Amino acid sequence: MPSPFHGISMAGNALRAFQRAMEVVGNNMANVNTRGYSRQTIEMAASSPTTIYTASGAQQLGTGVNISAIARTRDFFLESRMQSALSDFGRSGTLSESLRSIEGVLNEAGNRGISSALDGFFNAFSALGSSPNDAAARLEMRNAGVTLTTRIRDTYARLEDMETNGTLQLKQQVEQINDLANTIHRLNGQIAREQVMGAGATNLADQRDMAIQDLSQLVNLSTQLHPDGTMSVTVSNFSLVDQHTVRTLPDTFDAASQSIIDGSRSVPIRGGKLLGSLQSLQHLSSAMDSLDTLSNTLRAQINPLHASGINPLGNTGVNFFNDVVPPDLPTGARDFNLSDEVLASSEAIVSGVSGAPGDGGLALQFSELRNTKLAGLGNKSMLEYWRGTVTGVASESSFYKITHESHGAIVEQVQSQIDAVSGVSLDDEMAELVKFQRSYQAAARVLSILDSTTEDLLGMLR
Amino acid sequence: MQVSTGKRITQLSDDAAATPYLIQSRSVRAAVERYQKNLTSGKDFLANSESALNETAKIMTQGYQLALQGATSATEQSSRDAIATTINTLQERLVNLANTRGNRGQFIFGGQTNEAAPFTVTSGTLTFNGDTNPIQIETAPGTRMTVSTDTSATFIEAYDALEALKNDLRGGNIGNLSGLDVPRLQDSFETMNALRGDVGARLQRVGELEIENQRRMDELTSTISEIEDVDIVEAVSRMQQTQVAYQAALQASSVSFNLSLMDFMR
């Protein structure tokens, strides 16, 4: 049997519930600009009825309203879509940026690249061969050689710098990953504790979701939500965060296999900025390999013939490029230069075997090398070989530029879908606010009517 | 960006498909430019050879006429001696012409050994100290053209013919003059003329190649410009379109930002 004041306490409950509801709406509106905030909704349920006995038997009498939950609105499918979209976006962004820098270093768009230096080099030989008596042609030849070797060396040095920076960047990314993993682990603990006490930790869960989004930009990951409210995070075959522990991702890596090396085990990286960094390093090292091959090919093609002729100083056995004595391996692009003799004087340059002042035969032979297909370069001429490297970088760069743009569009699209579900719309919240305000007014009205009837009743007792 | 630089491609990835073609065209243009310069120096060489051979041919004509004059029995011996002196001068001029220098100071008839005078006179005979190796220029990928002319035998024969003429004039050998010297000079003139014709033909070929290369270079230049340069009219109109779109977006958003349910509630 309900108390005589049952109605009053019921109206009071309703007032309280609507007031809370308005507070939740207010909280939503206050967080309209908060990153990662998901809209909260208040869920109300009729409270358990009480039984009354009437002439016709036992009846259920409603006891008013109860707040059953304050929940975050989230769509887990959209969130996992967002994770993979962010991972793609991060990867293509890093890769596109670094390919563009490699392109900038190769600098082939203008006339200041290695291609034009190679052209100049062969053309200078053509000039020397065609007028071997011209001392100016010999000087020009030396200058063309200096330009070529300097450009190759400088380009190599700049690529090496980029490699150092790329490695540093990669280690920073691993550090960020570990920081975020620690954050997630800490939040896991707090959420689990709150859960035990029976409260859903909405704000903490928001923070954890944000950390996971940040993490998925850095690396590919999969998540699993456990019944105790904790979330475990796995990167490929490496369990980063699980229910109770967190592990540190090591920063040793192997760019060729695109994986992080964890002791004897390798963790393949399949997405995120980390993969972008690994792939950038791979592109860098292949560009550097090309330069090494090019330098060593120039040495091998020019030096032996050059050494077979006699120069205007009367010397024979002079190399054009610096070189090592055969059993040692050629040193590639890093120290590529003209030989000391040629650096010292353009008169050390050989134009013909006989050494006769008008003999330009060897120089013409060198000039013709420009179109010679070489087995060591996959049956390409030196110019074609280098062009192939440059074109490869350019097309990859343009591919990833476009890919990055489309990944950006996907991220935006998913974000707008998430916003539609979880974001705060001021108009909606205003409508909610009005709804709850009116409900509150109605409940207050009920209370005042009940009050006056109670007053009437008490007046009769007087 | 495009409007300000005038270039459509500032990084190769701006148009990756055109990249290999662009670099290759540039490379070919640079090479053709070089061949063009080689042709210029070859032309100088050939022109120098041609004028030297022209002069030599004139000397031989003169020698031939003087031989005819000396072969006539009406001519007195004193006149023959005078003619012989003239022949001597002709011989000196011939040696000078055989030792003609090119634009770079090289002796153009010396073969590859061309830094010292290739022809020297020792006791009435002309000797050749040069070699017969050719001077070549590169005119196209893998194509060489010989610009030097092997004249050693011709010059020696011409000198010897004049020497014999001179001796016969001095010795009053009328029979030899008309029977041997006149036809020998004629032969020598003809050989010289044939060489001149050969040089002239090569000179003409050089001219043709120059025109051909120039046309190729113009083509390549316009190809390269088509690939990398901006069509300014198009770029500017595109820029304006973008500007208009941007302004429209700004205006639209300034209107829609103002709309809110709050405006309709009191």
Image: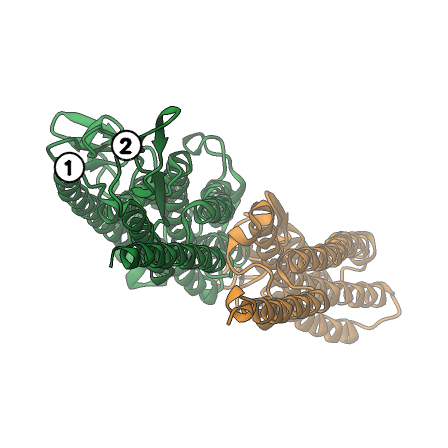
Chain colours: A green, B orange
Percent position of residue A291, x then y: 36, 45
Q: How crowded is mark 1: few (under 14 residues within 10 Å), some or many (20 or more)?
A: many
In the figure, is residue A50 to the left or right of B96?
left
Q: Residues within 10 Å of mark 2 (few under 14, many from 20)?
A: some
In the figure, is residue B26 to the left or right of A456?
right
Q: Mark 1 points at which residue?
A: A192
Secondary structure of the residue carrying numbered label 2: strand
* Residue B12 to residue B264: above or below: above
Report if residue A81 is visible in the image.
yes
Q: Earlier in the sequence, mark 1 or mark 2?
A: 1
Chain ID, mark 2 = A
Q: Mark 1 vs mark 2: tell me if same chain.
A: yes
Percent position of residue A427, x then y: 49, 59
> A195 or B87: nearer the eye?
A195
> A373 or B113: nearer the eye?
A373
Percent position of residue B227, x then y: 64, 55
The reply to whether the C-beta atoms of the residues labelled 1 and 2 are less than 8 Å apart is no
Q: Which mark is residue A223?
A: 2
* Residue A78 to residue A176: above or below: above
Q: Residue A98 carries which label?
A: none
**What residue appears at the point 20 percent right and 36 percent down from the top-left corner?**
A253
Secondary structure of the residue carrying numbered label 1: helix
Amino acid type at circle 2 is Thr
Q: In terms of image quadrants, where is residue A106?
A: bottom left
Percent position of residue A312, x then y: 37, 58
Q: In terms of image quadrants, where is residue B73?
A: bottom right
Distance of mark 1 from mark 2, alpha carbons?
A: 16 Å
In the figure, is residue A160 to the left or right of B163?
left
Amino acid type at circle 1 is Ala
In the figure, is residue A20 to the left or right of B138?
left
* Residue A125 to residue B74: above or below: above
**What residue appears at the point 44 percent right and 52 percent down from the top-left corner?**
A351
